[in-house]
Image: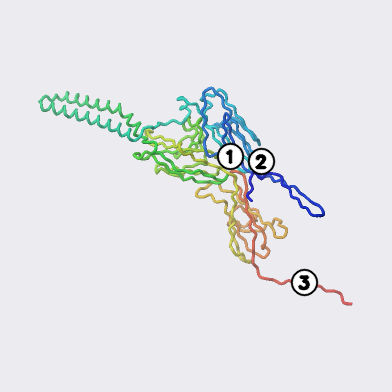
Amino acid sequence: MNISRQHTDTYGCEALNEHGNASIAVSITVLYPPTITTHISGEKQVSDGSYVQSVIVKEESSVILRCSVDSNPPANMTIMKAADTFARIISGRELILHLRNISHRETGIYNISAINEHGTSYSIINISIPDSSNAANQITYKDKKSNNLVRDMMIGVLCGMIIALCVIGIVKFIAKSCKNTLPGQLSIRMWLVRYYMDWVSLTVIFLPIWKDIGCYGDNSDYTITVNDVTVQEGLCVTVPCTFTIDRSKRLTQAVGYWGYYDEKYCTAGSACYVVSSKKSVSLSYRKKNFHMAGNVNNRDCSLTINNAKKRDGGYYYFRIEDGVDGTLKWNYRDSYLRVTVTDLTAKPQIILPEKLVAGNEVTLTCKPPDTGNCSGTAPEITWVRLEKEDRAESDPLIICGEKRTRISQCKESTLTFTLSQNDHQTAITCDVTSPVVGKSIQTSVTLDVQYPPFISITTETSGID
């Protein structure tokens, strides 16, 4: 039977025959990760952390954010806005945040988290005020609402006017030449200056429109392909990511960013960015364990997270900038990357020969949990040997890596020793500790050593009368 939280209850068992009866009660407590339920001004929403709930409120109104959590054991709940903690409860069931006289200062993203020893649940609430001034609280970039048809029309009009101006100038010049009224050298220069200024003026007037319409292209040109990722605490993961831009653009000096999803700090330039493809860029909220794994000039926005921590969990978005004059700036906020960091449960693996024979030398290798194609801080490895009889710890001499030492002092991933009959049914344990999270995981093997038979004869004598 698959146990669920609904099975938490007291169960009774009763036996009865003609001589009497007996009964016993068993209480079953099911432990499970938290699930957050949010009530916003009476509106209920159950959260699995996979979406953002938006709430539009009037300025100077009030909002009651009521968060309850279903978990066993009770979870620690926190409501945060950027780096500010608004409310927190330890081992509780409900958390309430009352926002009064809301102004633009209170708008933005509120991150709600609930954590217990079995997992983490997230919920994100976006509170906004429906007026034009609220745009200042968001990451701003040129909002391209135009389509390709409008862009092509404007470019065509501009090009047509420039060509017409040039044609008119040439016609006038030829006409004056045919009438033998060609102006003198000074007049020719003035004529050229006049038409040059006309051309420059027209360009100055229409170039911003051309640039504004054409430098980004249609919104549909800007797409990103990235999938949510789950990584265990202390391990690492590389998230594949690709993006597209305006088909008429080429990336040459591109700089990519990954930013944490938080409206308040995103308005402060790079304050919410955690990593950049350009290492010299100063980031106030840089995460040293985040690295850009791809070349953004090749439209590769892949991200590597080393030594994952619980606080690395959340929502992230990608931003691209290119060009010396900064004409291309785009935030891919239609598709967020959700990072979930779970407890460290993966086990190390002990690799040894399939056949163990007394008298032969054997090498055991402890392989930490697979980290994929990335690397984090090397784990700490220790070995333990338990005897077969009383499972008492023993400490024989072995070859640790390339030096001879006691097994308890071996910190290498390999150890070598010569098998004997006494090693049969002994247990070897590999303990791997992650220095980042300070947690240990271990695995054990019992040695099955083959050895030749031997005969033991025991005699007993008794006295003769």
Name above or below for residue 146 compared with residue 393.
above
Name above or below for residue 417 compared with residue 151.
below
Left or right, 149 with respect to 285, comes to: left
Label 3 and label 2: CA atoms lie apart by: 60 Å
- Secondary element under disc 1, as helix, strand or loop, is strand
Q: Residue at x 45, y 37 (%)?
A: 334
Residue 180 in the image, given as x and y percentages of width and height = 10, 25
Q: Which residue position is annotated with label 3?
A: 458
- Give residue 121's mark: 1
Q: Residue at x 79, y 51 (%)?
A: 22
Residue 184 vs residue 346, the one in the foreground: 346
Name above or below for residue 420 compared with residue 51.
below
Q: Which residue position is annotated with label 2?
A: 73
Label 1 and label 3: CA atoms lie apart by: 67 Å
Residue 317 in the image, given as x and y percentages of width and height = 47, 38
Residue 331 in the image, given as x and y percentages of width and height = 44, 35
